Image (tube, rainbow, N blue to C red):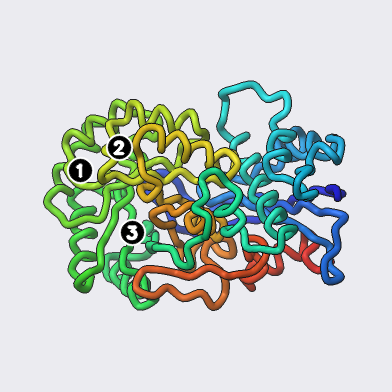
Amino acid sequence: MKIVDIRHITVPIQSDMANAFINFSKMDVSVLAIVTDEVRDGRTVIGYGFNSNGRYAQPGILSHRIIPRVLDSEPDTLVDPETGHLDPGLIWTASMRDEKPGGHGDRAVAVGILDMASWDLAAKLAGISVQQLIAERSPAGIGTANKKVWVYAAGGYYYPDRGIDALQDEMKRYLAMGYRTVKMKIGGASLADDIRRIEAVLSILPDGATLAVDANGRFDTEQAVEYARALEQLPLHWYEEPTDPLDYEALGIVAENYTGVLATGENLLSRHEATNLIRYGGLRSDRDVLQMDSALSYGFTEYQRTLSMLTGYGWDAARCVPHGGHQFNLAIAAGCGLGGSESYPGIFEPFGGFADGDEVQDGFITLPDVPGIGLEEKSSLAPVLAQLGNSN
């Protein structure tokens, strides 16, 4: 068994929405396929992967460094001798050959794309869902994957032509879809305007539904604390990423001034950055939420090491709710017993969202029980996958 080709394309995300920091109108995504010489039911076995939203496509790093190292490896060095199958950990090691420590950045995203495809491939070769493969074989796995996962609807972006009425209507749509927690952006307007927006959403939530807010790292320490003191008076699910993701001192100061739940971590691109967050960020393991995203931080092969680190510092996996809003992070949550996963209903298509037919019920969603991640179960992804060999 061997890899015969690794292909990738760049696909745009077309949207006029913005958060407190960036406009998504020029955002794009790398989509990658690992093609093997294995044939099942008359079809070539292919693993697919892509990066989560918020980071750009990585064609240069993939083409220049990551992919050639894997293709230049001796085929046997990528195969698990026990299963005889291509192994995500061995593929990951090959892709990182001759890379120095540190300097994570876009490299972490490129490797994460390849690693997602590796896990999709490994589960297809094993003939089981990726969540069950993770549950059974990963050190972070729980043995038997959870059948359903808590999800929340992330939206509430700033649009140039939408006001508070449109924001309320958006949140009502998410509630009608079965979500019980919704999230909106803050920091792109004045504090007074953001409080009006927040109160408007809170006013339409039914009993048992909650609202989280996300500043996307916009604030300096003083602004973040000012918001914290204002938000303290409101019944929020969490206050997300108030400061720059690497300013651990500032985050600790916010934690000292906010008794509610803080959430952060989506912009940390390595296990080592996550370790520094836990050591120096002032977070509280009894309440705060960690949002590290494997697809942006060297993949699940690295993320399982992050989970091991968290255990060593006394954090429960249930405090982890990955960013990303796609099927792979949902599967990781099911296989590792995480607290949940982000969701982007109708946003960042075709990459955001879950398999066709999977409905959110009372805040939870089930996962497709098919070999691999189940990306082929999402019809809007079919034209993209077809460009990489899905019809082969």
What's the residue at 61%, 43% (across, down)?
A: 112
**CA–CA distance between discs 1 and 2?**
9 Å
For marks 1 and 3, the one nearer the N-term is 3
Q: Where is residue 368 in the image (x, y as percent from the top left)?
A: 57, 70
Choose the circle earlier in sequence order: 2 or 3: 3
- Image quadrant holding the C terminus, namely bottom right
Numbered mark located on residue 219 in the image: 2
Q: Which residue is drawn at 53% across and 36% down?
A: 305
Local SS, label 2: loop
* Residue type of the residue flagged with mark 3: Lys
Q: Residue at 40% x, 43% y: name it.
A: 21
Mark sitting on residue 183:
3
Q: Which of marks 2 and 3 is in front?
A: 3
- Residue 343: x, y in percent? 45, 61
Q: Name the residue under label 1.
A: 227
Q: In this view, does 56 lie above or below 13?
A: above
Nearer the observer: mark 1 or 3; the answer is: 3
How far is the residue under mark 2 from the one under mark 3?
A: 18 Å
- Residue type at mark 1 is Tyr
- Using a 10 Å C-alpha cutoff, classify the residue at mark 2 as few (fewer than 14 neighbours), some (14 to 19) or many (20 or more): many
Three-letter residue code for mark 2? Phe
Q: Can residue 170 be seen in this view?
A: no
The quadrant in which residue 93 appears is: top right
Instruction: Identify the residue shown where x is 17% and y is 51%.
Output: 192
**Which is more N-terminal, label 2 or label 1?**
2
